[in-house]
Every structure is written in structure tokens, then in C-alpha cells.
Image (tube, rainbow, N blue to C red):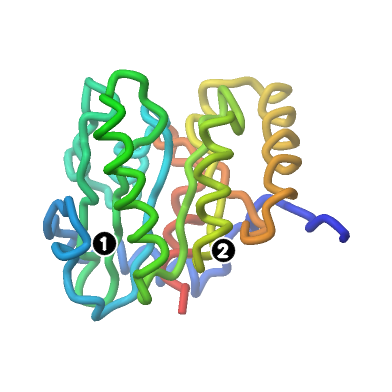
Amino acid sequence: MSQMQFKLADEPEFEAREKGRLLFAGPVDFVKGVVAMSGLPPADRREVCFAGRSNVGKSSLINALTGRKTLARASNTPGRTQEINYFALGEKRYLVDLPGYGYAEAPLAIVAKWQALLKQYLAGRQTLRRAFVLIDARHGVKAVDEEILKLLDRSAVTYQAVLTKVDKINRTEREAVIEQVKGALAKHPAAFPEIVVTSSEKGEGIETLRAIIATLE
């Protein structure tokens, strides 16, 4: 079986960029935090979700995308957020923030409960169009990320890797981590073959990610 070729996501065309800008310039509201499948809002619009290990910069990325500094609260205690948090992008999209995984401090029972909820959510949400898996550019794909990638392979959801914190590494390190991530993803058949490289602090890749989310059908 030939391995899929991965590449960096292209800069968006004007129309896609404008769609992304308009989507995220509109109202963005926190809807609810969900701890069980029964609490999910109605599946009445397309949604995307963000997954990533604790400290990967997920809250910062969501805040950068939405242009709101405090929309997603960055917890000082990794793994403290145990809920699936729903945000409405206007009336047409949901942006879903999944709890950080791979934290050592949480009791095993809590981790098991969260993993069960995550599996149910990924397998059973018809309106979920794509999962974005955040990978810290300083570390690349680690064993704990492999676990989530395997889980996503088994669910019916396309997922795409997003490198975070690229401003924290130099050009050589950046090229090395991109190659490492490409190699890791090539083993996963459900992975979308484009990687988005981002820096919440510098704004790199934010327009590209907005455009991708806005143009998903």
C-alpha cells in the first residue's frame, strides 16, 4: 500500500480567505459545556472540533481564530477542563473545544470517563465535518498523540494536523518537525493530507485555518 503524501496547506484563495474572515468576524458565542452525549446541542449545523494534548496552545489558537482574547479560557492546571465546550460561529457553524488529553495529574477514572465520551462524540456526531488535531511544534507527534490519531482512524471523521507554537522554534527545527509530523501521519489512513502551520502569537496560519473551516461542506 503506498503511503499518502503530506504537504503544507496552501495559502487560501481570496474568496476562501474572505469567507473565513467573515465567519470569524461575525458573532461567536459560548453555547455550553457538555459532560455527556445527552447534553450535546441539536445537530442542526456543521461543526469542527479541536483536539490536542494539554499545554498544546488550544485555547490560544481558538482565541486567535475568533479574535477574542478570553473566549476559550486557558487553564493554569492542564487537563482541568473536562467538558466538551461548544461555541457558535453565527448561526451556521459550531466550533467544538475538546478537553486536553495526555495530562498526568488527572485520576484514571476521570481519564477513562473522558475517553469514553470522546469516542462516543467522534463516532456519533453526524454533523462533525473535521477534527483538527493540534501538535506542539516544539515536540512533534508524541505517543499520546498517536493514541488520539488511532481513535480518529476508527471513527468516521476526517482529521487534519495543525502545528502550534511555530514561533517558538527556529527554521531548522521547524523543517525537522514538519518532516517528523508528515512521517507520523502517513501511517494514518483517515488523516487529511495537508498540515496547517500556526502561531497564535504571530498570527501565522490563522487566515488559512479560518478559510478551511469556513469552506468545509
Task: Report the number of numbered marks.
Answer: 2
* In-image side of 91 versus 181 (left or right): left
In terms of secondary structure, where does tag 2 sit?
loop
- Expressed as whole percent of the image width and height from the top left, the position of residue 8 reads 67, 50
Instruction: State the residue at coordinates (36%, 69%).
Output: 124
Determine the residue positioned at 34% across, 68% down: 47
Residue 186 falls left or right of residue 110: right
Q: Mark 2: which amino acid?
A: Pro
Point out the image quarter for the N terminus.
bottom right
Q: Which residue is at the far right?
A: 2
Give above or below for 89 relative to 207.
Answer: below
**Rendered image quadrant of residue 137:** top right
Residue at 22% x, 62% y: name it: 37
Q: What residue type is disc 1 on? A: Ala
Q: Compared to 21, does 84 lie above or below?
A: above
User: Mark 1 = which residue?
Assistant: 25
Check disc 1 and report its element: helix, strand or loop: helix
Left or right: 133 in relation to 29? right
Q: Compared to 61, does 176 lie above or below?
A: above
Name the residue tied to disc 2.
12
Residue 10 spot, x, y in % from top left: 64, 58
Q: Give the CA distance from mark 1 to mark 2.
A: 17 Å
